[in-house]
Image (cartoon, rainbow, N blue to C red):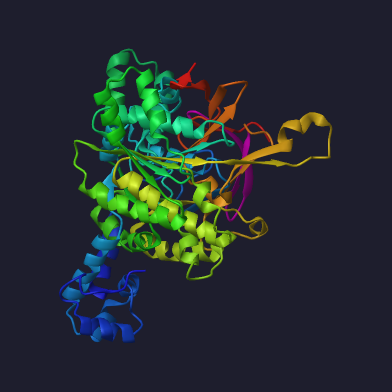
Amino acid sequence: MQSQIESGTELLGRLNKKSSLCGLEDTLFFKGPLCTDIIEISGVKSSGKTLLLSQMLAKCILPNCHEIKGCNASAVLINTDHHFQISKLVELMSNIANAVNTVSFTTDTVDVKFDKIAVIKNSLRNLHVINCYDSEQFAVTLRTLNNIFIENTKIALLAIDSITAYYWQDREDNHITINAYVKNLLQLIRTHTAQFNVATIYTKLYENIDNKGKKLTDNINYRIRLCKTCDSKNFICTLETTQIVRKIHYSILSNGIRWKMDEK
Amino acid sequence: MTKLSTTINSKLSSTMIEKLERQQICTVIQFIDEDSENLIKFTGLLLKDILEIKQNIFEKFGGVIKNAFELLEIEQNNIVPTNLSSLDNLLKGGLYYGQIYEICGISSSGKTQLCFAIATNIALSPNNIVRYIDTKRDFCGSRIEQILLKKNCSKQVIDEVMDHIKVCCVYSIHQLFKVLYWLIDSLKKEDEGCRTRIIIIDSLPGVIFKSSKDNEITITLNHLANVCHYIAKEYYLSIVTVNLITEWSSVIQEGPSTSRKENCDVIPTLGKYWLHVPNTRLLLEKIGVGNRKLSIWNSFQLEADLACTLTINDSGILFS
């Protein structure tokens, strides 16, 4: 790569202090995710992939004040599936903010309500959205990440919903398996995120059964698999890291994903 | 993939492009990926120029960064109520821009009638244009007129509404793409005052099932999804598609009759890939004579299984 410019960006990346993503999703991540972790969320249709991603984005961009334990970090979302909706994100953000209120019994509700909307609207400025509509645009966008990270030094999280959106378009002229396809993209993403200490979360539609026995490869730090059960109200999340494999039950409610910790 | 061309930057001449092609650098992506030092060698340009060209490519072919704060405002300003109150309640106020809604149901469950009702109501509000892409030669102007007459609309209003519903018939997937691309051009020319709010495609299986090979269909549907998302997001409108459903009855032998409900699997047609494309899928079912149930089948934004009932008669669709 360009020698003079690279050294500058490297320096910038090293010197910039980012907000920690601790507390992004306490149920899933014990500590962290750490600054350059890669998290994969995979699952079948309507298993809550985009919802989980939105929930983490909400936590990421909310401030750490008024007892809202947000991460106060910026994030960039590359929207390829167009399932993500801002009003849904706002709903999830208000749920987080409301949950705080019920605990701390504030007196002046009107004032707090006004404040809350302002807090949410303000935190929305922390989120940058890039809409992509075809494979080439997505490819070029991934290559501009460096510039984006330089211009917005507060960005600590890169979200992609979903990474496989253009698999079929790309496959038209290049036969490649979906896993190899994702691996190539991750390699490219990593060259950008590693320098700037940015964590990556992406969703992926298909889940190959033959993946199950395989160990975590391609530098993925967390693999989150979302599955439906026979009972349409209950879902199972399998969390896989290099050390552990955990199963957590959850359900999808109108206000987001509810983890059921006590059940085995 | 886009080939390098002189339109990217005036400094990139056609002789340079030829030289680059000899080094296997033909597309814009290959250009960005190539080491700048090498590009200097191949083209004879200065580093400054190479970086400028790369920047031009980023701006021209990459995605545009938007702030979520502004996107929320755009979203809130572009909710189009269908004025069918039960439907609007289901959809949290109406149709949101950037969304693909799909109406599913067996044949004669009232999908087209629901489309007519939505089209009429949206076109009734001033300055709204409705684009109706008809793949089955089903569109019926006199039916729209009938609905409007029952609403006691004057001749002038009826004419206006008819004028604001632009119908287009397509007979193949190829024509559908042609119409969508043509629409992109004409949407660019629309002014803020009177513009397209909704595109209705009735119906997709009408043109998609005519081609056969599985892989080809997936690639076509991928392409269609991309074009639809582009139009819906960039021109602040919503798209309503109509789809059929397929019933798979698989008799499960094991266990007693507890799992009778699972025996009949109802899925939308158009295959596995299309399943996750529409943002909200509505299911229209017949219940009794003349009554229909409309429910949210699945959605990324709305709670599933919420439902309302409606009847279809000569004054259009009535929600009860």
Residue at the spot x=33%, y=27% of the render? A66
Q: Nearer the viewer, residue A264 or A30?
A: A264
User: Can you give x and y, in whole percent of width and height, for residue B118 in the image?
Assistant: 40, 30
Judge whether B304 appears above or below B209 on screen: above
Confirm whether residue B63 shows in the render: yes
Image quarter of residue B63? bottom left
- Magenta residue span: A234-255
Q: Main secondary structure of the magenta part?
A: strand
Q: Tell me which residue sits at (37%, 45%) in the image.
A: B168
Location of the N terminus of chain B by quadrant is bottom left
From this viewpoint, is residue B81 visible? no
Residue A55 relative to residue A217: left or right: left
- Most foreground residue, A231 or B197: B197
Relative image position of residue A107 (x, y in whole percent): 33, 12
Nearer to me, B308 or A115: B308
| Above or below, A41 relative to A191 | above
Q: Which residue shows up at 35% across the image and 23% down it?
A: B148
Q: Position of residue B292 (x, y in %)?
A: 56, 24
**For the point 31% across and 71% down, which residue is it?**
B28
Q: Please say whether residue A248 is one of the residues in the magenta stretch.
A: yes
Task: Please tell me in which quadrant of the rendered image residue A65 appears.
Answer: top left
- Left or right: where A197 falls relative to A180: left
Question: Picture quarter containing residue B38?
Answer: bottom left
Residue B78 position, x and y percent, is 29, 34
The answer to if B196 sits in the magenta stretch is: no
Closer to the camera in the image, A115 or B60? B60
B184 w.r.t. A187: above or below? above
